[in-house]
Amino acid sequence: MCLREVKKVRIMQLMTMSSMDETHIDSLLPIEISSFRNPWGKLSFLDEISNQHSYSYVLTIPHGSDDQVVAYICLRQIIDELHILKIAVRRSYRRKGIAYRFLADCLCAVSKQGVRAVFLEVRPSNSAGLHLYRKLGFHIVGKRPKYYLDTGEDAIIMRILL
């Protein structure tokens, strides 16, 4: 199954993974704002979902007459490597294993598409993120000095070989 063909895949009970589209953006922006010091705006997400090398997914749960975005991820593929640009979970759903399962399922899917390595940058102060990535098998492979402009913090570069 091609990544772009992923429409509805059951991940957790009552939650559905689907490709991100414009209709999800307004629902995920509050998650973005509460998760990142320099959040993306609507235009950044629109640019990302229109990029032919980008794979962006949302995890939703039924909520009234709509689906509520619980989590999202933005990935960018370059040949046989994938870069995780964003992953976030709605605050009220954190610490329930959702990010772990969501990212694990995404890694499983991309490994079937010929992706051999996945990279990401993470703040040293993001202990929850570091724990998640280590638990999934990512290893530190380097750092980017003063990567985060808002704090001057270095970025830890992590990689997993699939």
Image (cartoon, helix red, strand yellow):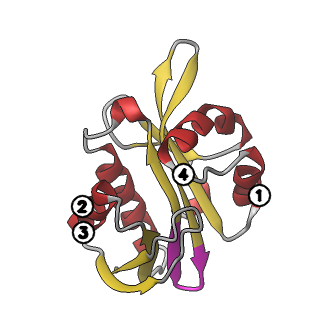
The residue positioned farthest toward the top in the image shown: 64
**Lateral position of residue 5 relative to residue 91, left or right:** right
Q: Nearer the viewer, mark 1 or mark 2?
A: 2
Residue 29 to residue 151: above or below: above
Residue that sits furthest to the left in the current view: 135
Question: How far apart, in angstroms, are the residues tagged by discs 3 and 1?
Answer: 30 Å
Looking at the rendered structure, the kind of residue marked 1 is Asp
Residue type pointed to by label 3: Arg
Amino acid type at circle 2 is: His
For the residues labelled 4 and 2, the Cα–Cα distance comes to 19 Å
Q: Which SS type dominates the magenta stretch? A: strand
**Do the numbered discs 3 and 1 sit on residues whose CB atoms are within 8 Å?**
no
Tell whether label 2 touches label 3 (CB within 8 Å): yes
- Who is closer to the viewer here, 96 or 55? 96
Give residue 134's mark: 3
**Image location of residue 55, percent across then percent down:** 60, 61
> Residue at 50% of width from left, 39% of height from top?
34
Dot 1 alpha-carbon crowd within 10 angstroms: few under 14, some 14 to 19, many 20 or more: few
- Residue that label 4 marks: 37
Q: Amino acid at mark 4?
A: Arg
Label 1 and label 2: CA atoms lie apart by 30 Å
Q: Write down the quadrant of residue 11 in the picture.
A: top left
Q: Which residue is mark 2?
A: 131
